[in-house]
Amino acid sequence: MPPGAGSCHFPLERDAAWFEQLTAERVRTRYVKGFPQCTWWKPDGRRNEALDTRVYAYAALRGLIAMGLSLNARAAALPVTQTKTTPSTPVVTSPAGSGTRSTPEARTGS
């Protein structure tokens, strides 16, 4: 599914166990007096904390929106900042003519 309305975005750090919790519950359809009733049930031994916390967070968000929170207005009110990118590993330089060598052995102390 392409990103957009109805999509869920997850951090890359989520592991398989987290997604197993997110999808632990199953829907069960039972007929009561001839009418279908769908209920969610959790198989014995399955953990579902990831699903529970996601549902709680979404319910809290919907409550805040019902009380007047506008995420678009809040985002527009944030200051725009320029971020300076830095290399992931610092570059170490030695002064010219200092007599030191920049070799892998010299850097690791081997």
Image: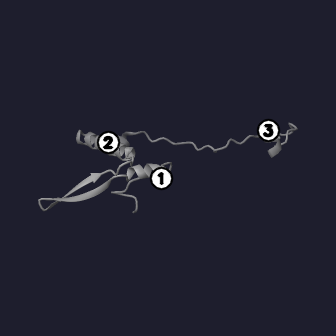
Structural crowding at the residue carrying mark 1, measured as other residues with C-alpha within 10 Å and reported as few (<14), some (14–19) or many (≥20): few
Using the numbered discs, state the Cα–Cα distance from disc 2 to disc 3 in whole angstroms.
55 Å
Quadrant location, the N terminus:
bottom left
Structural crowding at the residue carrying mark 3, measured as other residues with C-alpha within 10 Å and reported as few (<14), some (14–19) or many (≥20): few
Instruction: Check the image and name the residue furthest to the front.
Output: 44
**Element marked by disc 1:** helix
Q: Nearer the viewer, mark 2 or mark 1?
A: 1
Q: Is residue 42 above or below residue 30?
A: above
Between discs 1 and 3, the one toward the N terminus: 1
Residue 69 appears in the figure = no
The quarter holding residue 53 reads: top left
Q: Nearer the viewer, residue 20 or 106?
A: 20
In the picture, the disc for residue 16 is 1
Structural crowding at the residue carrying mark 2, measured as other residues with C-alpha within 10 Å and reported as few (<14), some (14–19) or many (≥20): few
Residue 14, image x, y percentages:
48, 49
**Element marked by disc 3:** loop
Q: Nearer the viewer, mark 1 or mark 3?
A: 1
Residue at the image point whose x is 37% and y is 56% from the top: 7
Using the numbered discs, state the Cα–Cα distance from disc 1 to disc 3 in whole angstroms.
46 Å
- Residue under pointer 3: 94
Q: Nearer the viewer, mark 2 or mark 3?
A: 2
Q: Identify residue type, mark 2.
A: Tyr
Between discs 2 and 3, the one toward the N terminus: 2
Q: Is residue 87 above or below residue 27?
A: above
Q: Identify residue type, mark 3.
A: Ser
Residue at the image point whose x is 40% and y is 62% from the top: 2
In the picture, the disc for residue 56 is 2
**Element marked by disc 2:** helix
Q: Identify residue type, mark 1.
A: Ala
Q: Is residue 102 left or right of residue 60?
A: right
Residue 100, image x, y percentages:
85, 39
